[in-house]
């Protein structure tokens, strides 16, 4: 007999009193398999049941996840595993569930088997329902509830088409308190319709068969329940479904379209008073469209984090206190006299979904002893006490990173934004309010990080792009081509079984000879923008790393008193957010040779997009390379002459060099 590693949930259990239940918020958790046809309809239904019972609500969808970074596209063309966020082990899902059990007085309801079956049984929490059969599940969950069973059954969609529309009906289900199922299941309909009025929503055209269908339906639903919502969840069905509990809790209306940037355009009036939209990008043009509207974008994935509810019951903990300034100004002056070059890396790991990166990243930083920075949005600090982020305030002798790694606040604070594309007053107001909320979260303004990191604070200027792309690492020559708009791909892709010529070539051995033009390949950064840097200083920051003057020698942006602003001197222009990043160790070696060859003081500073290196689906392949990069820099580079420092120290050094006339300066305009 094979060993059964997971205990099966076989029966509904009674609700048992726990000694400390009155001190902890009550929480009902729905577990379901990611491919269960009724998961989202049941999720929204259980959401209103939990609310009626005075409980918080969360969900978890089981399923194979690849753990890779999903950068957008047409969802039905992706491997479903690529859409589902982090892996169970790499994303520390078991550990996060233990935190949930510790912080909440939990109950469980399981729409079929779950990977957490053993943990649920071992914890002894009440099991409200357990059945794959949706009719049986509903019978069980109402059996132990004082909530009246609804008289209306809402059937959503027809169960066909490349995309589910069900997540976008979540507010319809919750506000009307109906029983809901997805269309296309005649057995479930027959079992649940007796004694109920049956209503149908969105029957007819399968979702995704035209570019406008899902946008039309989701926007109409958002308008219908506008009085009950105050924000938006801009996400594909997989992400929107997994975040239904948060959407209900926070009043976000889920919307989606192909392309999503057109949905943003249609919401222009509604977004005038919305500082941030949560969701997942379909294309980097989403960032540009939201930024032009003055709205930040906070990115999420399914299962990243595994249980977002954990932030609703934070534990008191000391904030991320800045370590003492070191070295002294006198030592920095001595370095300047000796024409030394300092180095640092800022790791962009700021979106809520990228908290998963911290598990591997903290291990790598601890092993390499690299002095560096991590750029974070303010929402990341909501998980300060439930992720490795808390180690930034722990002394090294206790296993922490205090004094070695420092935090920087990223972009608009609440989320990422192409700052130079945003209306200046919107960016300034969002950043200021973000810093104020962070000060409250951390226990005072003195504990807010002193550094600021921009997504793209420089204006995007046009540049001419050749048809040939020459790469040096590794050496290659590719022919650039322009992708067709996603809206043009929908009709052919949704029901097609034969590949078109483009797809066939792309997936053949010839595909490696072609390279698609990325959203911002035909742009270059301009000079520093005075209004942006003034807003950064007004928010209380002491230094900033700017995307302006990329590719220039070490340069300080001047014009804002009290703010030290330095440029990046290592990396490549990527053509997508966050634009300027280190791609490999050779990027750093080239920068070192250039800087040391000038025989002038300066800094070797670059940024790394952490999700491409330390997401659970990438770390096995790229983690060793990132460790080599960190060890190289911590060890002084190839020459052994580069001084590794934290970004704040590099900014102080840049100020001293600028004041001494030893580096280039440009005035912000």
Image: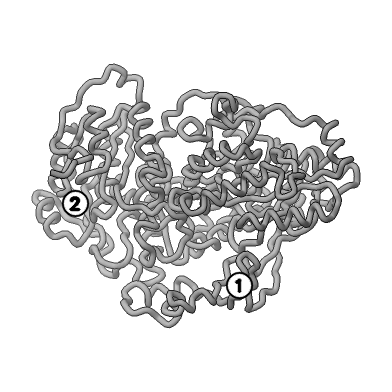
Earlier in the chain: of badge 1 and badge 2, it is 2
Asked if residue 216 can be seen in this view, the reply is: no
Q: Residue furthest top?
A: 19
Using the rendered view, name the quadrant where residue 79 is placed: bottom left
Q: Residues within 10 Å of mark 1 (few under 14, many from 20)?
A: few
Residue 275, placed above or below residue 450: below
SS at mark 1?
strand
Residue 476: assigned label: 1
Asked if residue 406 can be seen in this view, the reply is: yes
Residue at 30% from the left image edge and 36% from the top image edge = 51
Placement of the N terminus among the 4 image quadrants:
top left
Q: Is residue 319 left or right of residue 138?
A: right
Q: Nearer the viewer, mark 1 or mark 2?
A: 1
Residue 581 or residue 424, whichever sits in front: 581
Q: Is residue 13 left or right of residue 60?
A: left
Residue at 38% from the left image edge and 54% from the top image edge = 66
Residue 399: assigned label: none
Residue 17, horizontal then vertical, whole percent: 23, 20
Q: Residue furthest bottom?
A: 501
Residue 519, horizontal then vertical, whole percent: 58, 66
Residue at 35% from the left image edge and 68% from the top image edge = 208
Residue 40, placed above or below residue 505: above
CA gap, disc 1 and disc 2: 59 Å
Residue 344 or residue 594, whichever sits in front: 594
Placement of the C terminus among the 4 image quadrants:
bottom right
Residue 400, horizontal then vertical, whole percent: 56, 29
Residue at the spot of label 2: 153
Residue 457 or residue 591, whichever sits in front: 591
SS at mark 2?
strand
């Amino acid at each position: 007999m094979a060993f059964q590693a997971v205990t099966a949930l076989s029966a509904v259990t009674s609700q048992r009193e726990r000694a400390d239940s009155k001190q902890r918020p009550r929480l009902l958790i729905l577990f379901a398999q990611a491919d269960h046809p009724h998961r989202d309809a049941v999720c929204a239904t259980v959401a209103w049941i939990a609310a009626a019972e005075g409980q918080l609500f969360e969900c978890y969808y089981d399923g194979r996840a690849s753990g890779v970074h999903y950068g957008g596209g047409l969802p039905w063309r992706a491997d479903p595993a690529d859409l589902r966020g982090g892996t169970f082990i790499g994303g520390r899902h078991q550990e996060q569930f233990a935190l949930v059990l510790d912080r909440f007085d939990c109950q469980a309801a399981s729409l079929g088997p779950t990977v957490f079956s053993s943990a649920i049984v071992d914890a002894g929490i009440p099991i409200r329902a357990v059945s794959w059969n949706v009719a049986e599940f509903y019978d069980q969950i109402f059996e132990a509830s004082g909530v009246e069973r609804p008289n209306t059954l809402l059937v959503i969609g027809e169960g066909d088409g490349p995309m589910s529309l069900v997540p976008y009906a979540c507010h319809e289900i919750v506000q009307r308190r109906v029983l809901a199922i997805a269309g296309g299941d005649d057995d479930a309909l027959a079992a649940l319709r007796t004694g109920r009025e049956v209503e149908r929503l969105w029957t007819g055209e399968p979702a995704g068969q035209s570019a406008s269908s899902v946008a039309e339906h989701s926007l109409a639903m958002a308008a219908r329940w506008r009085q009950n919502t105050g924000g938006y969840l801009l996400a594909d069905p997989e992400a929107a479904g997994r975040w239904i509990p948060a959407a209900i809790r926070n009043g976000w209306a889920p919307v989606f379209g192909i392309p999503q940037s057109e949905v943003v355009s249609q919401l222009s009036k509604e977004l005038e008073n919305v500082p941030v939209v949560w969701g997942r990008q379909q294309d980097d043009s989403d960032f540009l469209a939201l930024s032009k509207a003055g709205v930040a974008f906070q990115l999420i994935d399914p299962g990243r984090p595994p249980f977002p509810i954990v932030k609703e019951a934070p534990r008191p903990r000391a904030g991320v206190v800045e370590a003492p300034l070191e070295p002294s100004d006198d030592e920095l002056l001595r370095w300047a006299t000796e024409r030394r070059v300092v180095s640092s890396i800022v790791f962009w790991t700021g979106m809520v979904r990228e908290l998963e990166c911290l598990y591997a990243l903290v291990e790598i930083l601890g092993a390499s002893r690299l002095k560096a920075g991590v750029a974070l949005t303010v929402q990341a600090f909501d998980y300060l006490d439930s992720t490795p982020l808390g180690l930034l305030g722990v002394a090294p002798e206790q296993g922490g990173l205090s004094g070695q790694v420092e935090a920087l606040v990223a972009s608009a604070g609440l989320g990422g934004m192409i700052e130079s594309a945003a209306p200046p007053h919107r960016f300034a107001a969002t950043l200021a309010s973000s810093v104020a909320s962070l000060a409250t979260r951390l226990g005072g303004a003195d504990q807010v990080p002193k550094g600021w990191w921009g997504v793209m604070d420089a204006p995007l200027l046009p540049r001419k792009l050749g048809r040939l792309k020459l790469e040096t690492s590794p050496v290659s020559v590719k022919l650039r081509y322009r992708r067709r708009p996603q809206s043009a791909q929908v009709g052919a892709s949704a029901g097609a079984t034969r590949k078109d010529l483009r797809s066939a070539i792309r997936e053949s051995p010839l595909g490696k000879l072609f390279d698609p033009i990325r959203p911002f390949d035909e742009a270059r950064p301009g000079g520093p923008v005075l209004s942006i840097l003034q807003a950064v200083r007004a928010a209380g920051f002491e230094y900033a790393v700017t995307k302006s003057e990329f590719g220039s020698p070490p340069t300080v942006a001047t014009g804002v008193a009290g703010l030290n602003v330095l440029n990046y001197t290592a990396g490549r222009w990527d053509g997508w957010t966050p634009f300027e990043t280190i791609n490999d160790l050779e990027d750093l070696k080239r920068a070192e040779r250039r800087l040391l060859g000038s025989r002038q003081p300066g800094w070797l500073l670059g940024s790394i997009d952490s999700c491409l290196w330390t997401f659970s689906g990438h770390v096995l392949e790229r983690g060793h390379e990132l460790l080599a990069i960190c060890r190289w820099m911590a060890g002084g580079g190839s020459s052994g002459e580069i001084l590794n420092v934290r970004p704040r120290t590099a900014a102080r050094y840049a100020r001293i060099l600028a004041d001494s006339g030893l580096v280039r300066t440009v005035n912000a305009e």
